[in-house]
Image (cartoon, coloured by chain):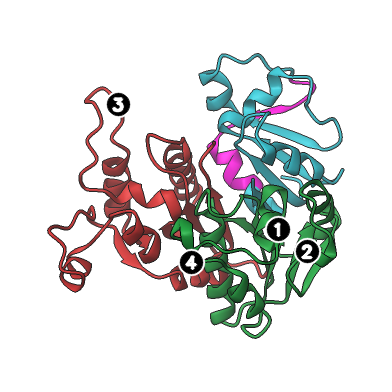
Amino acid sequence: MAEYPTLHILNKAPEHPRTAQCLAALAPEDALLLIENGTLLLATQGVPATCQLFALAPDIQARGLRVDTKQMKAVDYSDMVSLSLAAKRVISW
Amino acid sequence: MSTLIVIDQAPYGSWAGREALDMTFSLAAFDQEAALLFTGPGVNWLRKAQQASEIGQKTVEKNLAAAPVFGIEAIMADRSACARYGLSEASLIAGVALVDPGPDLYRQYDHTAFAG
Amino acid sequence: MAATDRDSFTLVITGAPYASQAPQTALAFARAALEAGHRIDRVFLYGEGVHLASALSTPPSDETHWPREWASFLQAQEIPGIACIASALRRGLVDESEQRRYELSSHNLLSPFQIAGLGEWVEGRIKSTRTLYFHGGS
């Protein structure tokens, strides 16, 4: 698994103020993992194209979302564990 | 190992800010490097002359004034959030540094945490 | 950070059951971490997260009982589950010794959860390879 300076884990819906804070804190070499309501970002036009993007498959499926695999990678909980260790720091927004 | 505690919720209307302050002071009590960042409506914690006794709460101005004594390295406030809430440097409590939160700021800390 | 033979986690849950998905995500993460051979040093409940330690939680029978799911996981894996004392007392989560100390009518902390101070979080922060937060969603 690649190393990232920061793994950002976002669990808030797109309208939540913390989503904007999270997106403003992304560096191009960072990774963003969408979980829970954060996966709803995939249904909007607001998906960041600047950094490596992951989304938790069980949360995507629960919400009936369709995913563009060119845009992001669907991962499971064991990938979430590996990502959190691969990044130098993790911020849970 | 430095920790940034972020407070982005308004004072008095929720307890998250208070609980974030508790986290910060407990890091300091265990000699861990800690700094505070106020952003969004959270910057309203930093307004001078708050009086919360009539709503049955305590202000945190004294706690924040004591922060450097307890070893808390920095109290920072998001510049644009301060502008949004009409907080000039003159209306902020003493010892607050205005910053522009972004990748560069978060990267200075090993660990960033919200209370909720 | 120095690599250890076994990576370890401190998990902090700040989102309450039945108000957020935090307890579910955290439990799935914890199981995956153990399956990958990592260690969970402790689970720390903070803020609204302390409601996960309520012995009186009684969801409808067709809903997952998150407090019991967590309690049996912690018991089986011998992982300390700690509710922050200040968060817990404010929200009416009390163990037997706090019941005696404050002369309260009852106690309701679900075993094996324990009540302790924020020092447990600070220690996890220092000892574990990673400390992860599971927040509420609203």
Q: Which mark is residue C63?
A: 3
User: Which amino acid, by three-letter code, is at mark 1?
Assistant: Phe
Find disc 2 in the rendering and name its residue: B91
Mark 3 and mark 4 lie on one chain; the one further toward the N terminus is 3
Find disc 4 in the rendering and name its residue: C121
Q: CA distance from mark 2 to mark 3?
A: 50 Å
Query: Looking at the colours in the rendered structure, which chain would you say is drawn in cyan?
Result: A
Q: Which mark is residue B38?
A: 1
- The N terminus of chain B is located in which quarter? bottom right
x and y percentages locating residue C66 in the rendered image: 32, 38
**Residue C130 in which image quadrant:** bottom right
Q: Is residue C23 left or right of residue B26?
A: left
What crowding class fits label 1: few (fewer than 14 Cα within 10 Å), some (14-19), or many (20 or more)?
A: many
The segment highlighted magenta reads: A69-83
Report the front residue among A56 and B113: B113
Q: Outermost residue, front direction?
A: B54
Callout 4: chain = C
Q: CA distance from mark 4 to mark 2?
A: 34 Å
Labels 2 and 3 positioned on one and the same chain: no
Callout 1: chain = B
Labels 2 and 1 positioned on one and the same chain: yes
Query: Looking at the colours in the rendered structure, which chain would you say is drawn in red?
Result: C
**Residue B51 in which image quadrant:** bottom right
Q: Are marks 2 and 3 in contact (CB under 8 Å)?
A: no
x and y percentages locating residue B74 in the rendered image: 74, 73
Work out whether C20 lies above or below B22.
above
Q: Nearer the viewer, mark 2 or mark 3?
A: 2
x and y percentages locating residue A42 in the rendered image: 70, 22
